Image: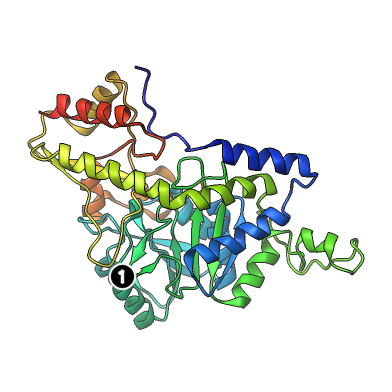
């Protein structure tokens, strides 16, 4: 059997047909597919909100932080246990990401540590619903309200995730940002979406997504004003999503329930098979919430026969790709040196990072693939 990669996109003939049809249509850039994708995305969420399609979640975080007023002299609370995007987008605007330790159960932002780090400069919190498990919204909303903070949710892992009875993206926070990167729960190759209930934030993000022009490209060719006429109102960015990508996304969106169902089944099979091994298995969602199972992150316990790095090597020898999510930001040279972070300042993340690994859990995995992962883990850890 060939090497099982850590992740592989789940693409069917339907996505391929949709992209080919778009290529034949004569309209490749942001157009009717992107507009339909935005509409269908908020319909899926059932949100009274607007969706803004962009070419990555990183772009979406940048747009959202810009729209809520992040800039020099402002601070945003960001968990250290995340991909660098969440923090770097704050730096793009000259703001400071204030790294926060994580909860040892969920590896999501620890609101008690966040409490200690709020200052008069703090204007927002950017929780990451890590691996597909949400930061409980009651506590999050309460925290934000008490400190007068805006909330930009990094939902790169949590499409779709129920958070205390409602899907992530429907709790009324300023912005929720999704990623459609190739390894995420649904993909457009590269792409993303920002959802906001606030029409003013939506308008600002739509403008900044395309050069600070106050009308979309598509409008330029369909509205009855002359197509050459537009106003540049700000030095915006180039973050729009192509129609070929949006066409793929529309099909992936329809297949989302099927794909999340498959990942949930795989997680269940892993949980059952790994009982009794020296592993701390992933935390499950509490009653009323759900887990999107973007990642299956387990941690070696102290009685494991090998350390994490050796475990990953042995898995590779057994032809199974694994990964680590994440090397905490405070350990990366840029963040460490710029903000003088020490590992001891983030005791939970620094310790858990030594033990954590992610197993393949993508919806295109066959039953044989799942068995291969289980057999490899058991052979190494039994
Ligand atoms: C993947 C990821 C991102 C960035 O997504 P892109 O679409 O690649 O920009 C942001 N945050 C987290 C937590 C991620 O895992």
Q: Residue at x 80, y 66 (%)?
A: 232
Q: Is residue 95 visible?
A: no
Q: Number of labelled discs?
A: 1
Location of residue 221 in the rendering, given as x and y in whole percent from the top left corner: 84, 59
In the rendered image, the vertical position of residue 348 relative to residue 162, given as above or below: above
In this rendering, position of residue 114 left or right of residue 57: left
Nearer to us in this view, 88 or 227? 227
In the rendered image, the vertical position of residue 9 relative to residue 289, given as above or below: above
State which quadrant residue 345 falls in: bottom left
State which quadrant residue 205 falls in: bottom right
Q: Residue at x 51, y 70 (%)?
A: 73
Location of residue 372 in the rendering, given as x and y in whole percent from the top left corner: 27, 26
Q: Is residue 1 visible?
A: yes
Label 1 sits on residue:
164
Residue neighbourhood size for the residue with mark 1, other residues' Cα within 10 Å, grouped as few (<14), some (14–19), many (≥20): some
Q: Residue at x 78, y 47 (%)?
A: 27
State which quadrant residue 154 falls in: bottom left
The quarter of the rendered structure image containing the N terminus is top left
The quarter of the rendered structure image containing the C terminus is top left
């Amino acid at each position: 059997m060939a090497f099982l990669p850590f992740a592989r996109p789940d693409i069917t003939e339907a996505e391929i047909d949709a992209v080919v049809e778009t290529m034949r249509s004569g309209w490749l850039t942001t157009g009717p597919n992107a507009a339909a994708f935005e509409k269908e995305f908020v319909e899926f969420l059932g949100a009274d909100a607007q969706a803004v399609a962009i070419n990555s979640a990183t772009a979406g975080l940048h747009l959202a932080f810009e729209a809520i007023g992040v800039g020099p002299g402002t601070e945003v609370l960001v968990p250290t246990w995340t991909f660098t995007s969440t923090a770097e987008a704050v730096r793009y605007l000259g703001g400071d990401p204030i790294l926060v330790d994580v909860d040892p159960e969920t590896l999501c932002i620890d609101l008690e540590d966040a409490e200690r780090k709020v200052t008069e400069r703090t204007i927002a919190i950017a929780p990451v619903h890590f691996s597909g498990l949400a930061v409980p919204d009651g506590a999050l909303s309460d925290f934000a309200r008490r400190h007068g903070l805006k909330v930009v949710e990094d939902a790169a892992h949590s499409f779709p995730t129920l958070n205390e009875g409602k899907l992530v993206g429907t709790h009324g926070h300023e912005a929720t940002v999704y990623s459609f990167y190739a390894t995420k729960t649904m993909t457009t190759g590269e792409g993303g979406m920002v959802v906001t209930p606030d029409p003013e934030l939506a308008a600002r993000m739509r403008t900044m997504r395309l050069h600070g022009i106050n009308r979309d490209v598509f409008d330029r060719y369909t509205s009855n004003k002359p197509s050459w006429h537009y106003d540049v109102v700000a030095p915006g960015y180039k973050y729009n999503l192509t129609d070929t990508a949006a066409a793929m996304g529309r099909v992936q969106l329809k297949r989302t329930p099927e794909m999340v169902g498959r990942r949930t089944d795989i997680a269940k099979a892993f949980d059952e098979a790994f009982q009794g091994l020296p592993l701390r298995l992933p935390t499950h969602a509490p009653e009323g919430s759900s887990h999107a199972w973007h990642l299956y992150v387990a941690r070696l316990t102290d009685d494991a026969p090998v350390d994490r790095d050796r475990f990953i090597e042995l898995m590779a020898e057994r032809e199974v790709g694994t990964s680590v999510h994440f090397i905490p930001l405070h350990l990366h040279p840029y963040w460490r040196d710029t903000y003088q972070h020490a590992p001891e300042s983030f005791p939970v993340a620094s310790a858990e990072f030594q033990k954590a690994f992610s197993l393949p859990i993508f919806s295109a995995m066959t039953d044989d693939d799942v068995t291969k992962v289980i057999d490899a883990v058991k052979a190494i850890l039994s």
